[in-house]
Amino acid sequence: MRSLVEPNPRARAGEAGAKKPAGRQKEGWPRLPRGPYNQMHGRGRETERTSPERTIRMLTATHFYSYASCPRWAYLDMHGDRGLRHAPSEFLQKLLSDGRHHERAVLEQLGAERVGFDGKDVEGAVARTAAAMAAGVPRIAGAVLAAGGDGRVERLGVADLLERVPGRSRLGGHHYEVVEIKTARRVKPPYRMQLAFYSDLLAGVQGVAPQHAHLIMGDDRRESFPLAGVRGRFEAQLARLREIHAGHEPPVYVSSTCTTCPWRGVCVPQAEAEGHVSLVYGLQREAVSRLDGRGVRTCTDLARLDPACLDEWTGCGPSWARRLVGQARSLMQDGVVWRDDPRLPRGGVELFFDIEGDPDTDALYLFGVLARDGHGERYVPFLAERPEEEARAFLACLEFFESYPQAPIYHYHHYERTSLRRLVERYGVEAARVERLAARLRDLSADVLASCYLPIRSYSLKAVARYLGFEWTQHNSSAVQSVVWFSSWLRTGDRGCLERAVEYNSDDCRATRVLKDWLASGPHGVPEEETAESSTPAAV
Ligand code: SF4
């Protein structure tokens, strides 16, 4: 099996760059239990006493974000050795930098007064925030809110903005509500949890619970919501996070989330060493937990399982059970298991299509098409060099498609189809044109899943095409890196960045073509029926 992650260079023992924890070591704070993470890293009570890396950190709003992605992520953020974290990607750094710029601009426009906080003097910053609230400052930026017991800070929040509203409280005839400033244009569920967390801390300071919380989005739109509507979910997540804070270690669950998680250098090697069952693509977290209760813990256990048992134990349905067991067998045999011929058209003009866009702003900047006929192929990029050129680029691409009315349009996954739907609504394209286009789109990710099992752990275009031998020209290319290049181009005017984004898109189109040709030239590997002989129920 191939590794999902590159080794983390900073994870090598003793190397510089391993950061110290931000939290303070306090006598009497809970100690780390000896869970699998600690056993793997040889960490027990002896080590805790001597290593500041083992200090349990305060519970913050960030933990609601990491918890929403993976409960174990929150655990490792609280208890893990920060020297083992992967450094933030360029894309994440871009998001953080965009966020800081947007926040600064909004706060300046609102004329908010900032509470200074150096990240260390928590008590001082909490006291300054409380003083500003007592003085009735209309807008307080960077408000530091904390809660705890026995003189210890256990929960800490730094809210972008507090806004004064009328109504009695411990402060007098006013109190405050929380406002968060985001670059995104759509409200995501963790935003509400973050606001509920700050509002809960705020209630402790002002002696009255705020009724509403607010978001200022990337397009300066304001979204407000009543906190009563999220209280139940917030309390459930807070209770779960408190258990994790106290040392309850959620198990490893390898999924696509791991590729962006800073702890992938910890969990994925552990899962690989164990042959953990979550390495089987498509197995849900809940199913992993149920299978664990039945003694099915490794890919080998799953490969030996009768799909009917899997369906009965997890309720995943017969066809998905067949898929999961087939996937496990492919991993065990380290080879292709063939299910069915995808019956793809051959010959004539074929179009391979890939879109690049910024998920945070919903802006699409590149519509790339690789056109192939019996004589050769050519790549045609329809590029919106500035966000305001999106309509022109999209409509030019649409006309290009219409100039080959019989050609199938191959793409990978649903992004192209859903983006086209959004664009036709945005630019009012006639329904008949849209229907004709939609009928020609063919998602090869559905074909690959229906035709075969590959010995890989993700069915992204990158993972599938790389398995087939295709390599991207730029070693660090990815969809999010393309967004970084495009935004660098917008900021600096460096055409090299734009060219890298176009080259990446051209490679994506070629990778789609490689996949189509491979599928059309099947069958490959071992027929699925021949793997069934090892399907005797595992001794569980
Ligand atoms: S690497 Fe994966 S399993 Fe580990 S914390 Fe991150 S998302 Fe969770």
Image: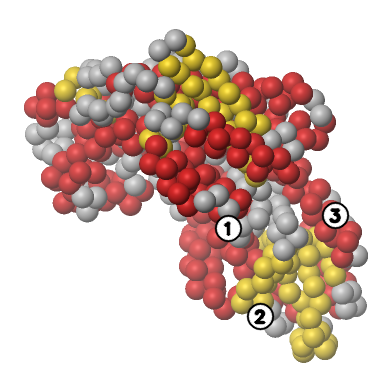
Q: Residues within 10 Å of mark 2 (few under 14, many from 20)?
A: few
| Three-letter residue code for mark 1 | Lys
- Numbered label attached to residue 188: 1
Q: Residues within 10 Å of mark 1 (few under 14, many from 20)?
A: few
Q: Nearer the viewer, residue 323 or 147?
A: 323
| Residue that badge 2 annotates | 211
Image point (70%, 59%), residue name: 217
Q: Nearer the viewer, residue 399 or 71?
A: 399
Q: Is residue 40 visible?
A: no
Which quarter of the rendered picture does the C terminus lie within?
top left
Secondary element type, mark 2: loop
Secondary element type, mark 1: loop
What is the spatial separation of the Cα atoms under label 3 and label 2, in whole angstroms? Answer: 27 Å
Q: Is residue 395 left or right of residue 98?
A: left
Image point (85%, 54%), residue name: 105
Q: Earlier in the sequence, mark 3 or mark 2?
A: 3
- Numbered label attached to residue 86: none
Q: Nearer the viewer, residue 290 or 216?
A: 216
Q: Nearer the viewer, mark 3 or mark 2?
A: 3
Vertical relation: 203 (above or below) 316: below
Q: How is the image coloured?
A: secondary structure
| Three-letter residue code for mark 2 | Gln
Image point (75%, 79%), residue name: 206
Q: Nearer the viewer, residue 95 or 246?
A: 95
Instruction: Give residue 89's quadrant in the image.
Output: top right
